[in-house]
Image (tube, helix red, strand yellow):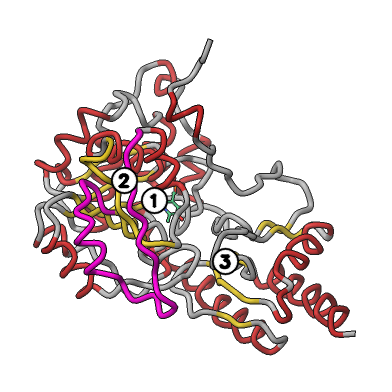
Amino acid sequence: MNYFRPAIASMQGYTPGEQPKPGTPIIKLNTNENPYPPSPKAIEVLRNLNSEWLRRYPDPYSQDFCHAVSTALEVPEDWIIVTNGSDDLLNILIRACAEGKERKVVYPMPSYVLYRTLAAIQPADVVEVPYAEDYKLPIEELAAAAGALTLIATPNSPSGHLVPLADLRQLASRLTGILAIDEAYVDFADCSALSLVQEFANVIILRTLSKGYSLAGLRLGFGIANPQLLSGLFKVKDSYNVDAVAILVGAAAMEDQEYKNACVAKVKRSRSLLATNLKQIGFEVRDSQGNFLLVTPPDNQAEAIYQSLKQQDILVRYFNLPGLDNKLRITVGTEAQNQKLLQILKQLTLKIHH
Ligand SMILES: *Cc1c(COP(=O)(O)O)cnc(C)c1O
């Protein structure tokens, strides 16, 4: 007996970055978590949680959290959908929009590998449009693919580049399907595409509390779009897709913009220092608007360096994908973590040269 649908039997599962237990002496620079703790106000809410919140089902629309988002970002509450991480929203979008050959999922490459996995589960055909070396958005090819759902991550991972607002606007105007703009890293970037949801009925912005707000373990994300676009997504989402703890803790974190901005400012300073220091030891470093750097180590040593770092309890991301085979994606850590990384990288590259 074949237990699984052909789409599942034939697909590759998504491989998440390694997640060692907290408390192990590992410097974790592989999955773009924020190195600083979440807002003390959010932790306070968690400590004082009334058990009634656990006994009951949570609010299916996470309204307390919507209210906090509405205040922080100045968008109406009924323009917000709240999800179990933004991965949940990506899943909802693909289930709501995509199917087979007629309703394709389209995205540029390289980008977030999960897009391909979710499309394979549906199943829906994908059109993967390669980015050129300069990472200019391939608007013509993306528009010509006429996806039911087009996904653009900006800042993109793993490249770290920001897609210009004008390019997104042009793409949105050329598409009849939905354009989902994945702003997981927007807190570390110079600007956002949020204004496009006012201009275009087919645009949705995806956000997460995993990166900027240091809450990857909480699993909380949200989308912003006009209520008519959201109405289809509400039909697809689980009734209780966000748990009661996430709603309350997330709302407190969202209200504490000042704390988030202070952490983000520290990460941005460290990002620029780390880039400078890596260049000094012979790495090529792309400019990044995320909390990570995509780097090319000297002498084609990406995989060897990844392995050696791992042996010394430092995790970075090695993708082993076409175009990324001699690259590493390094999350910006605390100053102490970055210094430790640089110290070991210096030794490794010296060894390679001699
Ligand atoms: C991290 C990330 C997400 C998912 O974040 P969640 O933890 O599921 O909220 C989505 N898109 C991109 C590009 C990411 O890097």
Kindly identify which residue carries mark 3. 324
> Which callout, 2 or 3, points to the residue nearer the camera?
3
Dot 2 alpha-carbon crowd within 10 angstroms: few under 14, some 14 to 19, many 20 or more: many
Percent x, y for residue 281?
A: 72, 86
Whether disc 1's CB lies below 8 Å from ligand 1 is answered: yes
Kindly identify which residue carries mark 1. 208
Q: Residue at x 23, y 53 (%)?
A: 71
Residue furthest bottom in the image: 280
Q: Earlier in the sequence, mark 2 or mark 1?
A: 1
Kindly identify which residue carries mark 2. 222
Q: CA distance from mark 2 to mark 1?
A: 6 Å
Percent x, y for residue 1?
A: 53, 10
Q: Residue at x 19, y 58 (%)?
A: 74
Element under label 3? loop
Residue closer to the observer: 346 or 38: 346
Give the numbered dot on residue 17: none
Element under label 1? strand
Q: CA distance from mark 3 to mark 1?
A: 25 Å
Element under label 2? strand
Q: Give the vertical position of 178 relative to 167 (above or below).
A: above
